[in-house]
Structures are given as C-alpha cells and as structure tokens.
Image (cartoon, rainbow, N blue to C red):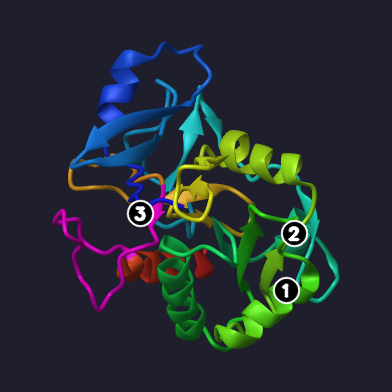
Amino acid sequence: MSKKTNYSYVGVSFIILLFGIYFVPKIIDRISNDDIVRDESRSKDINLNPKKRPGNLSDLHFIEINGVKRKVPDFSFTDQNGNTISNKDYDGKVYVIEFFFTTCPSICPKMNANMVQIQNAFPDERNFGIASFSITPHIDTPEVLKAYADSNGITSPNWHLMTGDVDEIYKLANEGFYLYTAKDENAEGGFEHSGNFALIDKNGYIRSRSDSQGSPIIYYNGIISEEEKVDETGMEQQITWLKEDIAKLLKE
C-alpha cells in the first residue's frame, strides 16, 4: 500500500465536465505532489443541489447518478465471528463503510483508529453500525479479523469486519461505491485502496453533506484524525463532520 490520500470531492467538477451523461464512472489518476490521488468519479447527473426535504429528512444529500439515488448494492460475506452478514443486516441502521486489510502498513491503521473514535461516539446506539471489508480475504480469515478487532478496540456488536470472495469484494468497492481498490506490487503492502468512508442511511442510501459551494462531498476522508486537524497538504479532517452527519441520520 502506498501512502496516498484519497479525496473524493477533489476534481468532481472537472469530472462532470469531462464525462458524458451515459459514461460509466471509472477511476482516474492524477499526480499531485508525487502522490497518486484517486478521484472516485461521478456521473454528469449527480445531484449537486440540495432540495427542500419533506418530513424529518435532514439536509444531507442523496447521491444521485442519472436521476437515480445511489443505494448500497447487495452483499453477503463472513464476519470476524464466523457469521454471514449481508446488507439486510444493516436495514434500519445508519452505518459507515470502509475497505481495508489487516496487514496494511500505512493508511489502514489511521482509518481504523478514526473509525474506533466514531464507534466510541455512539456507544449505546443500537441503530448505528460499521461495515469493514477486507481487500485481502486470502489473508484475513474470520480468525485473523477477530484478533484484529480484539487488538484495535473494536467492541460494537454492529461493527462487522468481513471477508469472502475476492472478486465480489473488489466489485463492491470499485463498481458499487467507486472507492478505488487494486492489487499493486509496487505499492507499500502490495495493495492500493481508497481512504474514504461512505455514509449510509437507514434505508441503504449513500448520503453526504455539502461543501462550501453546495455540492455533495460524496465521501468522507477517513485518514486525517480530529487531533491532526489537517494533513500536510492543508486538507482538513472530516471525522467531526461524519460524526455530526451520523447523528443527523439517526434522527431521520
């Protein structure tokens, strides 16, 4: 795994202008300060403007492509306790999604330290969960994931670390969420993946807040901690935003 940051909202406007309405979103690379920045790209018809929302809906965006709200694709994998977990197990819950691997030497420890902070912000909330998908399922067996959970402060019964068919996991990451994941022998740790978190509402829809221009940020940076505040590029942490937005969705 190379030391790369992944900012989903950087370059969204560029991508919207570049790709047509019927073009299937794909991962594109940009070189910035000697780092490869993976932009999780979007369709032209992504919903950029918040609308007045009925009832108890918050001000968070639904992410839309070609007028269709993006929903978590169906999945079914095995968690650290040996249980089969699917997207149906998260019905009625607000949850956060990430892709990681236990032997990751760079961004994963930062991501999961931040995820533990998020977990601890909602200690008694039964309707909040976390879904962590291993991108090295050949290494990350349920037993390995259980040991990882025990040594990293993962205590929530609704935090499932999942392993399973590698092709299905990569399809979920790259096609289901457009969160870049790939094997890369030249990368530190042998794999490269997004450091972003996806926020999902109780009905399985991907949600996010707006940036200063009113556009959805799409995903939340999972690498920079609240304590760090900013990274070396000046990017501000988004963990505080994510906590606030989880609380909003729990009230919907």
* Residue position for label 1: 144
Contact (CB < 8 A) between labels 3 and 2? no
Disc 2 secondary structure class: loop
Tell me the residue at 60%/33% (across/down). Answer: 175
Disc 3 secondary structure class: loop
Q: How far apart are labels 1 and 2 at the CA level? A: 10 Å
Q: How far apart are labels 3 and 1 at the CA level? A: 24 Å
Residue 31 lies in the magenta stretch = no
* Residue position for label 3: 3
Disc 1 secondary structure class: helix
Q: Amino acid at mark 1?
A: Val
Q: Is residue 5 left or right of residue 250?
A: left
Q: Can you give x and y, in whole percent of width and height, for residue 28 in the image?
A: 40, 27
Contact (CB < 8 A) between labels 1 and 2? no
Range shown magenta = 219-238
Q: Find residue 114 and report its image quarter.
A: bottom left
What type of secondary structure mainly makes up the magenta span? loop
Q: Can you give x and y, in whole percent of width and height, for residue 157 in the image?
A: 70, 81
In-front residue for pair 84/50: 84
* Residue position for label 2: 163
Please, which residue is most extreme toward the left here? 234
